[in-house]
Amino acid sequence: MTVLQLSTSEFRTLAARVTALAADYLDGLEQRPAFPHVSGEKSLELFSDPLPEEGLGATALEGLQAVLDASRPPSPRFFGYVFGSGEPVAALADLLASVLNQNVTAWRSAPVALERQLIGALATALGCQGYRGSFCGGGSMANLMALAMAREARSPANLSGVRPGVVYASTEVHMSIPKAMAVLGLGRDNLRLIATDERLRMSLPDLRAAIAADRARGLTPLAVVATSGTVNTGSIDPLEDIAALCREQGLWMHIDGAYGALAALAVPERFAGLNAADSLSLDPHKWLYQPLDCGVLLFRDAARARQAFCYTGDYAKSLTEDPLEGFAFFEESLELSRRFRALKLWLSMRYHGLAAFRRAIRADLLHAERLAQQVTATEPLELLAPVSLSAVCFRYRPQAAAVNADRTNAAILRRVIERGRVYLSNATIGGCFALRACFVNHRTTDADVAQIVPEVLAAAQEVLAAGC
C-alpha cells in the first residue's frame, strides 16, 4: 500500500468509531446547553498543539470529542439565526459523497444526472415547473449568481466591462445583496433600499417612484430583489405585484428565498408569485434541515445562465454528441469544482418523503404562532413585528420609564445565552433592540418552545436585580 492509504478493515474500524461518536452526540443533545460554555481563548487553547510530524494513527480520533464539546450543538432549543438542524440521514449521505469525491461539473456521471433530476423535482414541488438550476454553497452565492445573470440580461458587461445600473430591494434585504453589488462592480451606491409597509414588506408605491426617479436621472434600472422571508422577521414581499411591475418596466426579478421560500412546500398560499421570478435562491440547509453547505439557485431561462457564466477552455469541452453527456454545470454556474451536495438532500427526501418535510415546516410555523401568543399574553413582553413565517421578534418592556429598554434587552439576551437553556438572537425592529427566536429545527418540540418566555422573564429579573 502507498502512503496515506488505509486497509478496508482499518477504514471500517475508524468509520465505526466516528459513527458511534456521532450517535452518542445526537443521543445527548437534550442534555447539552443550547450554546457551549467555552470562551474564544479557551477554544484556541484546545487546538494549539502543533501538527505532528509522524502520524498518531487511530489515537488522532481522541481529539474529536473536544471539537464536539466546544461547538454549537444542533440543539432543539437553539432559536438563533436562520440555521437548519443537520438531518442525520443527510449527514450519512455526506460521508458517502466524500468517499465518492465527485467533482460535479460535467461528464456522463450519476451525480450530474441526479442533481439535474433533483433540481427539477424541487422546482416542481415549489410550483416552478420547468426551472433549471444548480446547487451551490448557500444563499449568498446563489444571490451573487442571480445578480450576475440579471446584469448580463439587462446590461451585458462580460465583454466590455460594467456599465452603471441600479438594483432595488427593501430595507430588510439580506446583507448578501449589497456584497454582491460590490463584487459585481455595480457598486453598493447603486442599490436602492426601498421603504417597507406596516408588515415590513417592500412598499410597491415607493418602488415604482424610485424606478421612475432613476430613469428621470438617466440611470438604468436592472433588477428588483424581492425577499421571500426576510432574515429579521420572515416578511414576504408582495411577489405578484412586484413581478407585474418588473414585467411592465422590463426589469429582472430575483427572489431571495434563502430563508422562507422552501416553506412553500407546506403553505403555498403564502407564496403566490414565486413562479414569476426570473431567478430564485433557496437554502435547503435552512428549512429543509440539511447539513451545511446546501444552497440552490433556480432560474427560468438556462440561456441567461450561460450568457453570464459560459466560458469554457478547450481542455474542458466535451467531444460527445449526447446532450446529457455534453452538459456542463460550469456553463450555467460560477463554480467549476463542485462537491456532490445533491446526494444528501436526495437521500434525505427519499428516506423521509416530501410529506414529512411539509409536516416539519408546518410544526415550525406553529411553534412561532404559539410563541407569539405567549408573548402577547405575558406582561411585560411585547411583540415588535408581525409573525409572517417562523421568526418571532419581541422585547421585555421595563416598567420604570428611566430604564433604557434597548440596553436592558441586550443585557437580557446575554443572560439568556449565559444560562444556556435556550439560545435567542437579536434584531433591530423599528429602531428597537429585539429578542428574536427563529424556528427551523426538526428537533424542536412544544415543550422546548414553552421554555422561551420563562427563560426571558427569569433573565430579566436577574438583570434588573443587578441594576443593569
Image: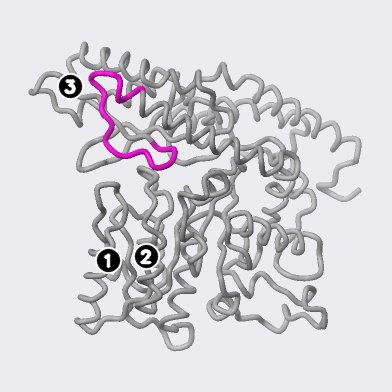
Q: Secondary structure at mark 1?
A: helix
Which residue, given by chain and number where applicable, does mark 2 sit on? 242
Residue 56, horizontal then vertical, whole percent: 74, 33
Q: Amino acid at mark 1?
A: Leu
385 part of magenta stretch: yes
Q: Residue at x 45, y 57 (%)?
A: 256
Q: Residue at x 72, y 49 (%)?
A: 346
Observer-nearest residue: 25 or 110? 110
**227 with respect to 71 (left or right):** left
Q: Is residue 107 above or below residue 43?
A: below
Which residue, given by chain and number where applicable, does mark 1 sit on? 207
Q: Which residues are magenta?
A: 374-391
Crowd rating for badge 1 (residues with CA inside 10 Å; few <14, some 14–19, many 20+): many
Mark closer to the chain start, 1 or 2: 1
Crowd rating for badge 3 (residues with CA inside 10 Å; few <14, some 14–19, many 20+): some
**263 with respect to 318 (left or right):** left
Q: Residue furthest front?
A: 269
Which residue, given by chain and number where applicable, does mark 3 sit on? 398
Rounded to the nearest angstrom, the CA distance separating label 1 from label 3 is: 37 Å
Answer whether labels 1 and 2 touch (C-beta < 8 Å). Answer: yes
Q: Residue at x 23, y 84 (%)?
A: 218
Q: Secondary structure at mark 3?
A: loop
Q: Residue furthest bottom?
A: 160
* Colour scheme of the rendered structure: one colour
Q: Give the number of marks.
A: 3
Q: Quadrant of residue 407?
A: top left
Locate the C terminus and report the quarter of the image it occupies.
top left
Rounded to the nearest angstrom, the CA distance separating label 2 from label 3 is: 40 Å
Residue 321, horizontal then vertical, whole percent: 82, 83
